[in-house]
Image (spheres, grey):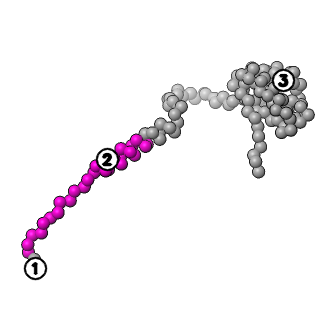
Amino acid sequence: MNLRKRKKANVEVHTSALNDIMFFLLLFFLLASAVVNPNVVKLFLPRSSSGQSVPKKTINVSITKDLEYYVEKEKVPFDQLEQKIQVYQQTSPDLTIILFADRSIAIENVVNLTDIANKLKVKLVLATENKK
């Protein structure tokens, strides 16, 4: 039997590489969290038991291939279209127009309605169909 004492090796753990890894992970998560919602301001809003959510008001404006204009399924001549939209805008200041235009009409007719919306400072969205 070998009774001589063996030399015990010193075990060392080098943690300098772990510090670098932890620093890079911390930096990554800080940058990633800043990019997720950069324009969001977190607020604690007051609470109310009688509060109601106000939905945004939208109206549908349609232009047929025969250049007939409809506001909420009501036929309206083009020269009266601005006054009709103003009536809806008075009831809801944050009005949004959803424009349903036939694909065969000239872009000039869509631009005319866009000019009316810009003049009244109303948002306009062009409705489309999904591709099949």
- Please tell me whether mark 1 sits on a helix, a strand or a loop: loop
Q: Position of residue 67 (x, y in %)?
A: 89, 31
* Circle count: 3
Name the outermost residue toward the left: 4
Are there few (<14), some (14-19), or many (20+) residues within 10 Å of tag 2?
few
Tag 1: residue type? Met
Q: Position of residue 102 (x, y in %)?
A: 84, 37
Query: In the rendered image, which residue does mark 2 sit on?
Result: 19
Image quadrant occupied by the N terminus: bottom left
Q: Compare marks 3 and 2 and give the one earlier in the sequence.
A: 2
Would you say 76 lies left or right of 13 here? right
Numbered disc in front, either 1 or 3: 1
Are there few (<14), some (14-19), or many (20+) residues within 10 Å of tag 1?
few
Q: Are marks 1 and 3 in contact (CB under 8 Å)?
A: no
Looking at the image, which is closer to me, 6 or 124? 6
> Which residue is painted at 47% across and 39% down in the image?
33
> Which residue is painted at 31% across and 50% down in the image?
17
On whether residue 87 falls in the magenta region, the answer is no
Query: In the rendered image, which residue does mark 1 sit on?
Result: 1
Would you say 53 lies left or right of 85 here? left
- Please tell me whether mark 2 sits on a helix, a strand or a loop: helix
Q: Position of residue 55 (x, y in %)?
A: 68, 31
Tag 2: residue type? Asn
- Please tell me whether mark 3 sits on a helix, a strand or a loop: helix
Looking at the image, which is closer to me, 43 or 111? 111
Numbered disc in front, either 3 or 2: 2
Relative vertical location of residue 6 with respect to residue 105 in this rendering, above or below: below
Instruction: State how far apart marks 3 and 2 are (Cα).
Output: 68 Å
Name the outermost residue toward the right: 66
Instruction: State how far apart marks 1 and 2 are (Cα).
Output: 46 Å
Q: Which residues are magenta?
A: 3-29
